[in-house]
Amino acid sequence: MSNQKKRNFQIEAFKHRVVMDPKYADRTWKILEHAIHEIYNHNASGLSFEELYRNAYNMVLHKFGEKLYAGLVITMTGHLRDIAKSVEAAQGASFLEELNRKWNDHNKALQMIRDILMYMDRTYIPSSQKTPVHELGLNLWRENVIYSSQIRTRLLSTLLDLVHKERTGEMIDRGLMRNITKILMDLGPSVYGQEFEIHFLQVSAEFYRVESQRFIECCDCGDYLKKAERHLNEEIDRVSHYLDPRSEKKITNVVEKEMIENHMLTLIHMENSGLINMLCDDRYEDLGRMYNLFRRVNDGLSRIREVMTGHIRESGKQLISDPEKLKDPVEFVQRLLDEKDKYDKIINLAFNNDKSFQNALNSSFEYFINLNPRSPEFISLFVDDKLRKGLKGVSEDDMEITFDKVMMLFRFLQEKDMFEKYYKQHLAKRLLSGKTVSDDAERSLIVKLKTECGYQFTSKLEGMFTDMKTSQDTMQGFYSGHPELADGPTLTVQVLTTGSWPTQAPVTCNLPAEMLALCEKFRSYYLGTHTGRRLSWQTNMGTADLKANFAKGQKHELNVSTYQMCVLMLFNNADRLTYKEIEQATEIPASDLKRCLQSLALVKGRNVLRKEPMSKEVGEDDAFFVNDKFSSKLYKVKIGTVVAQKESEPEKQETRQRVEEDRKPQIEAAIVRIMKSRKQLDHNNLIAEVTKQLQSRFLANPTEVKKRVESLIEREFLERDESDRKLYRYLS
């Protein structure tokens, strides 16, 4: 029974497979073909899509899928050829409009046909590896319409012509352009690329090649960059409106190459308007535009950096090689700070605060600042000027800004120990003369130096402040023990600890008798209360207040230096004194004496002495008199000393020698540290390690390092290898 059922099932199935004959299939296809014609002819409203779907379903089900598919290809091809003829016949502007309209019609028809043939799309096409209906419709459109010999070339030339018109300022229908390029994109990336994009890029390159050459010949650099920026933005805008988004990178590369990369050097070095002119004139907008455009091309920013660096270095070399600009150290350092501020502002506003540009700027400043061997001295003199008078009335924030700028220059110095030497000297003079703006300002800078240089340096500076406080207590004790001195001249002594203050050789100077007696009393008092100490008078660093009587009853109190006091006191016993007589009586060093006499006789409003003959300089044959005609609206008159801001050549040599001596133990300590750690090292690597360790303080001279190595070998800290004389070993 079960076998019979199986046979009956098989027979029934066989009957169903052969039920549709070819004539029925032909009739069914005719119905479907007619429907396709009606769809393309916009007469689909009377069609029954359900019935059409069933007919297509039956053809596929009864194995007439091949007939259905082949008929579809032939029918669609016929309609698309008619469409192509219609598009070809369109004239002028209507060409693209007709193409767009027919494309929309084809897409609508294709969607309806796809719905009718959905069963074929799902079953027959995958199994027979045919192209799906929608993709087939696109391919047939491409082959019969886009690739039509009458349309293909015309379409490309029309699109390129519209782009050119827009580039030259004409208005075009961007919506229509968008629709046409989207047709090409919908047909596949290769169609858009081969039929339009590749030609678009070639034409664009030629356009911008010609355009850039025209601009180069008639525009300055700033105007050229504006035009390049505008064109670049226009192309980006064009892509966003009617081109494939993937075209943006390609077209911007074309503009960048033709308008920027090919003309980089010409633009940078353009006469009267190139990069250097922009830098000199602070043209932030133009510089920012150049930065933003050049960053888009290879080596663009490096070219700007190279020229900027070269310009800064050359300007710096001119600054430090101009004798006129080196005459005033304070003005010299202010110029450095102004230049640094200028380029910091350019980098911040125009170069997007680019770290590579900041590093290039710092490197340039470090280069030319260290070309001037007196930069450490000048920077210290600048600080000295600010802490004496330059920061009066300045807010705390502004003071901190000034100090930060000074520390920035300090970091550029290779010989930081030279700066430290000068800074100690100048700080000592400020503290001893009481001419510092404020202790808070002094301590603020010391904190910054401590951060840079370490506690060893600042511990001595802090010792100076301690000495000043201790000296006040000492003087109170001195006068408490000598009440008889209350009615005579007042003596104020500052006792300085030798290790904390800059070492200076005692300068001989013959004090007036009344002052000399006071000094001896103080010496006796101090040594009596402090055993094992020795006092050396530094008369060159003192001040005095004198009461002076001039002709016509003029009375003034003069604030002078110790040297000036010694000179003026001589005129209590003489009306006229020659330079040589003054020098012999006071034994003040010649250079100091000349400055002292200049201050007393040649400074208008402070000239309590007069000189014969009158001249701007003090000579050894000059004679000096009390200026009876001296007058001032002020009772208290401060007579400063004509300051030799910069050291004289002998002083400079002496400072250099002291610094060189101070460096020796530092170099030796570095060598021992390195060798103790490494046990053995060859000469070249030892030099490199020592230089690296000491570079935060100074740039070690390889010759001096070698001498220190020899000294350590003699003292048996190191030894040479017997077989390799350039190899050193540490002796533990």
Image (tube, helix red, strand yellow):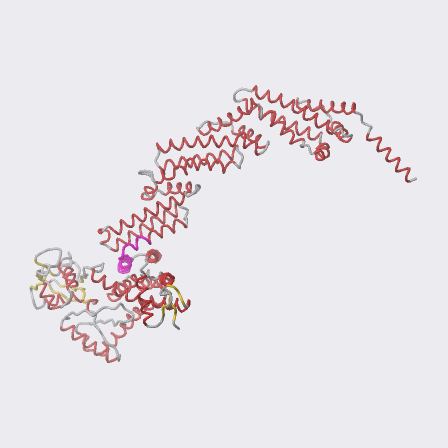
Residue 30 location in percent, x, y? 74, 22
Judge whether 513 appears above or below 384 on screen.
Answer: below
Determine the image quadrant of residue 664: bottom left
Foreground: 399 or 649?
649
Residue 382, compared with residue 234, is above or below; it is below
Q: Main secondary structure of the magenta part?
A: helix
User: Residue 529 is drawn in which quadrant?
Assistant: bottom left
Please tell me which residue lies in front, 388 or 318: 318
Query: Can residue 261 be seen from the camera position used here?
Result: yes
Q: Would you say residue 392 is visible in this rendering?
A: no
Q: Residue 546, position in %: x, y?
A: 16, 67
* Residue 549 in the image, given as x and y percentages of width and height: 11, 65
Q: In the figure, is residue 175 to the left or right of 681? A: right
In-front residue for pair 48/470? 48
Q: Which image quarter holds the N terminus?
A: top right
What residue is shown at x 24% (from left), y 80% (from top)?
A: 528
Q: Is residue 66 magenta?
A: no
Indicate left or right for 179 with 27 as reference: left
Give residue 73's quadrant in the image.
top right
Task: Count how many numbered circles sit on residues in the image.
Answer: 0
214 sits left or right of 513 in the view = right
What's drawn in magenta, residue-wise? 366-391
Q: Quadrant of the C terminus?
A: bottom left
